[in-house]
Image (spheres, rainbow, N blue to C red):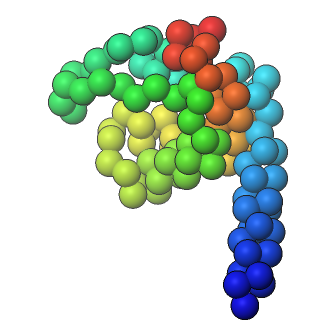
Amino acid sequence: MTRTRFILAAVAAALATSAHAAGDPAAGRQKNFQCMGCHGIAGWKTAFPEVYHVPKLGGQHAAYLVAALKQYKSGERDHATMRSIAATLSEKDMEDLAAYYSQAGGSAAAGK
């Protein structure tokens, strides 16, 4: 039974990885103009809705970024700016942005 679970987990992980690997990093780089304003400035703090450090996107896992954007779009995550930006994104846009930021590492934090 343990071997079967391992095989199923490996297949599920492969399918999940291939689904989010579908994003195009080059297209994501072209689409990140809305992201760079906050996430592209190292050490940036925002004052809405409260003062906090804006999270770094470069190097994050693509699946996490897509899930977060979907949660902002659906209203599961509550941040007015992110909800309004995510509302304009298609699933393909989300995958492209996630592919770019997951592969960009530290360079995405500097807006390069």
Instruction: State left or right for residue 32 relative to residue 76.
Output: right
Residue extending farthest to the bottom is 1
Residue extending farthest to the left is 50
Residue 53, compared with residue 37, is above or below; it is below
Residue 73 in percent (x, y) is at 49, 49
Residue 81 in percent (x, y) is at 37, 33
Instruction: State left or right for residue 100 relative to residue 78.
Output: right
Instruction: State left or right for residue 7 relative to residue 37.
Output: right
Image quarter hosting the C terminus = top right
Residue 106 in percent (x, y) is at 57, 17
Residue extending farthest to the front is 2
Q: Nearer the viewer, residue 89 or 5?
A: 5
Report the residue at 63% width, 49% height from top: 63
Residue 25 in percent (x, y) is at 76, 28
Quadrant location of residue 16? bottom right
Tell me, yes or no, if residue 93 can be seen here: no
Report the residue at 46% width, 26% height from top: 56
Residue 71, compared with residue 60, is above or below; it is below
Q: Nearer the viewer, residue 95 or 7?
A: 7
Report the residue at 39% width, 57% height from top: 76
Tell me, yes or no, if residue 62 can be seen here: yes
Residue 87, compared with residue 16, is above or below; it is above
Instruction: State left or right for residue 56 relative to residue 96.
Output: left
Report the residue at 61% width, 41% height from top: 61
Image quarter hosting the N terminus = bottom right
Disc tally is 0
